[in-house]
Image (cartoon, rainbow, N blue to C red):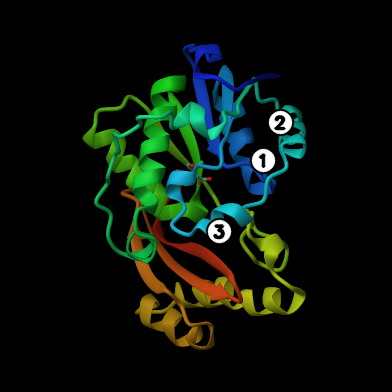
């Protein structure tokens, strides 16, 4: 596995699958690498904690980083190239051009500027790596919707693939942020996947999820449209940790 830190060292090749990540890799990322490996001749992963998509400086600073562990996991999953640039490589002095997807609702409203940061860094990665397909987790369902619109609107020849959410045995969706939960907070956080799973079977899933999330004070409960699938999505705050999750309402994840 080759680890490169500058754009100049990145090579392009046909049949490439790209897995963009912010590191702190877990089983959810493993599933993305496996999906990419299964249908690509060459797998490129990026490890870059993108400062532009954090709306809170404290959240950026607290974001877990463990490059040695990440490289080991990527190597074990057969990743061919890891692109792990420093921030100044992606945002050099004078950087001033942004992709602003005008996304409102759910994360778009709760985290102003977040999708502008995501869309900008992903377009840069698509241009640098030139993948045929790029892989993202269902857990960030709205990110998938934003990126699918980006490649359509800006004619970027990349297929956006979605990989189902990986959960711990108790039902909590894997997230780099889960490590910040105390045992008691984790118990409370389980209310999120439980509420979404039971509400998805109700005639008015948004109202049903709101009713069962009552004590968890959700930022939002919304239906997200990915084109081929509809998701019931919500965000909650448990202590100082913000968690998002979603479940399939109709259609297929692909
Ligand atoms: O989902 C993520 O980890 C990030 O938003 C992404 C896609 C790597 C862009 O920084």
Q: Residue at image x 69%, y 47%?
A: 26
**Cβ at disc 1 under 8 Å from ligand 1:** no
| Nearer mark to the viewer, of 3 and 2 | 3
Q: Residue at image x 48%, y 82%?
A: 217
Name the residue nearer the viewer: 82 or 31: 82
Q: Earlier in the sequence, mark 1 or mark 2?
A: 1
Answer above or below: position of 101 versus 86: below
Separation (CA) of disc 1 from disc 2: 7 Å
Q: Is residue 20 left or right of residue 112?
A: right
Write down the quadrant of residue 239 in the picture: bottom right
| Nearer mark to the viewer, of 3 and 1 | 3
Separation (CA) of disc 3 from disc 2: 29 Å
Residue 30 pos. (x, y %): 67, 40
Separation (CA) of disc 3 from disc 1: 24 Å
The answer to whether the residue labelled 3 contacts the one labelled 1, judged by CB atoms less than 8 Å apart, is no
Residue annotated with mark 3: 59
Q: Residue at image x 43%, y 32%?
A: 91
Answer above or below: position of 49 versus 41: below
Q: Quadrant of the C terminus?
A: top left
Q: Is residue 157 left or right of residue 74?
A: left
Residue annotated with mark 2: 77
Residue 242 pos. (x, y %): 54, 67
Judge whether residue 115 can be spotted in this image: yes
Q: Is residue 239 left or right of residue 15?
A: right
Q: Earlier in the sequence, mark 3 or mark 1?
A: 1
Residue annotated with mark 1: 30
Q: Earlier in the sequence, mark 3 or mark 2?
A: 3
The answer to whether the residue labelled 1 contacts the one labelled 2, judged by CB atoms less than 8 Å apart, is yes
Answer above or below: position of 127 versus 14: below
């Amino acid at each position: 596995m080759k680890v490169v830190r500058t754009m100049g060292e990145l090579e392009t090749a046909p049949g490439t699958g790209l897995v963009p990540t912010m590191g702190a890799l877990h089983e959810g990322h493993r599933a993305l690498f496996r999906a990419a490996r299964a249908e690509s001749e060459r797998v490129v992963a990026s490890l870059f904690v993108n400062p532009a998509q954090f709306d809170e400086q404290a959240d950026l600073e607290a974001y877990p980083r463990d490059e040695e562990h990440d490289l080991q996991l990527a190597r074990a999953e057969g990743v061919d190239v890891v692109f792990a640039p420093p921030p100044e490589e992606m945002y050099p002095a004078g950087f001033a051009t942004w992709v602003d997807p005008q996304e409102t609702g759910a994360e778009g409203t709760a985290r102003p500027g977040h999708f502008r940061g995501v869309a900008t860094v992903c377009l840069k990665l698509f241009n640098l790596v030139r993948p045929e397909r790029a892989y993202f987790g269902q857990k960030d369902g709205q990110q998938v919707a934003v990126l699918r619109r980006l490649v359509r609107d800006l004619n970027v020849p990349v297929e956006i693939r979605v990989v189902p959410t990986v959960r711990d045995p108790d039902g909590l969706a894997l997230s780099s942020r889960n490590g910040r939960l105390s045992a008691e907070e984790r118990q409370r956080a389980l209310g999120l996947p439980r509420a979404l799973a039971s509400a998805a079977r109700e005639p008015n899933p948004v109202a049903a999820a709101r009713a069962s999330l009552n004590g968890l004070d959700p930022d939002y409960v919304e239906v997200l449209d990915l084109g081929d699938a509809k998701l019931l999505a919500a965000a909650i705050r448990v202590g100082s940790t913000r968690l998002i999750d979603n479940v399939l309402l109709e259609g297929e994840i692909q």
